Image (cartoon, grey):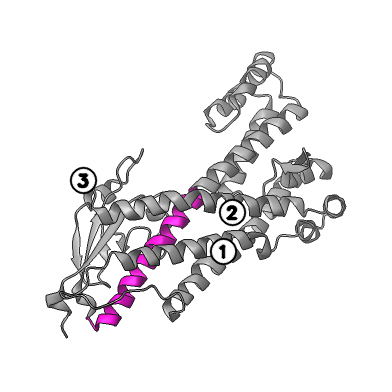
Amino acid sequence: MARPTRQTVQFRTLIAKLTPELRKAFLAGVADLGDRVDMNALVAALKANDIDGAIAAMHITEGAFYQYAATKTAAYAQGGALAATTINGPPGGGVAFRFDMANPRAEAWIAANVAGYVTRLTNEAKEVLRAAILEGYTAGRHPNSIAVDIAGRMVGGKRQGGLVGLSGQQVAHVASMRARLASGDPAEMAKVFGMTRRDKRMDATIRKAIDAGKPVSAADIERMTQRYTDRLIAKRAEDIARTETGMAVMSSRAEEWQQASETLGYDASAVIKRWIHGNGVKDPRPHHQAANGMTVEGLDTPFVLENGAVMQYALDPNAPIEETINCSCDVTYRFSHAKGVK
């Protein structure tokens, strides 16, 4: 594969720099939600079979993710600012390119993909808790146990092991681990060894239960699921940070090229885009690999990948999530000044 261009290196470096900041901001939001739980009200609502009251006791509001929103907005701004320095202006120079965050398109992107994303996060958290509470009732667990499951346990002044921040699929994995450990069925308990983010230091306890043909104790199940939950949160934070940082930077980059076209009075067809596959990915998408070097003419002309996915650029927020999560591909831009003259 050809050596990446300077433009690609610049943007990969920026995304790598900003990703840890967004990961930290997401985890700060999750921690803030954990700190605000009214445990007495939560247990009381669970005892009264009041699911809405239980969710209200968790105090899940968008304000918990203010740091996340600010960090992602800053990533968008930095991506656009960097893009302005990479534009190949017309011969003779004399044009200054700057990224305008007040442009209505930029403001609309932030509203949809920053504020809108925070709204989706909080709504998802509420639905995840609702499903977890119903699962707890179905399994016949005591309200106190359900409360600890969803809110976590206080350790060193901070809650650990709570379900807030997990995706619905991850919560299902936690429920599956708990059910397997409590089953007493050696074949079911052995399936836990295939759950890669478990704490392997506790495997000996599981093997002992398997040998005895008995369930793992309730206390050990709590410890194992809480540790598993913490690791799933860490994994999700990394996935969100890598994907959403890249998405913000790549989106503002496309927006800056739109602004530059308008500054020059160029038609959109003057922009040439080229797809660059991201190297070093453990499980690369074959159709992203096949797109490496694909060139399209026109800022609004999409890339059509081998699997039928249609994307304006790598990490396009309008593309299906399976095309963007943890994607490290790039799209470079340049002006064809001969095409720019209207």
Check contact, mark 2 vs mark 1: CB within 8 A.
Answer: yes
The secondary element bearing badge 3 is classed as loop
Q: Position of residue 170 (x, y in %)?
A: 58, 45
Q: Position of residue 47 (x, y in %)?
A: 86, 50
Query: Within the magenta stretch, is there residue 245?
Result: yes
Q: Which residues are magenta?
A: 239-266
Check contact, mark 1 vs mark 3: CB within 8 A.
Answer: no
Label 2 sits on residue: 25
Q: Measured along the vertical axis of the image, is residue 282 above or below residue 264?
A: above
Side of 81 where 200 appears, left or right: right
Check contact, mark 3 vs mark 2: CB within 8 A.
Answer: no
Q: Measured along the vertical axis of the image, is residue 215 above or below residue 227?
A: above
Label 3 sits on residue: 3
Disc 3 marks a residue whose amino acid type is Arg
Query: What residue is drawn where x is 31% and y is 62%?
Result: 313
Dot 3 alpha-carbon crowd within 10 angstroms: few under 14, some 14 to 19, many 20 or more: few
Dot 1 alpha-carbon crowd within 10 angstroms: few under 14, some 14 to 19, many 20 or more: some
Label 1 sits on residue: 70
- Image quarter of residue 80: bottom left
Disc 1 marks a residue whose amino acid type is Ala
Q: Position of residue 157 (x, y in %)?
A: 78, 42
Side of 159 where 42 appears, left or right: right
Query: What residue is drawn where x is 76% and y is 29%?
Result: 218
Query: Between disc 2 and disc 1, whose residue precedes?
Result: 2
Viewer-proximal residue, 198 or 113?
113
Specify whether residue 96 is in view.
yes
Q: Position of residue 224 (x, y in %)?
A: 67, 30
Query: What residue is drawn where x is 62% and y is 22%?
Result: 201
Q: Which image quarter is the C terminus in?
A: bottom left
The secondary element bearing badge 2 is classed as helix
Mark-to-mark CA distance, 2 and 1? 9 Å
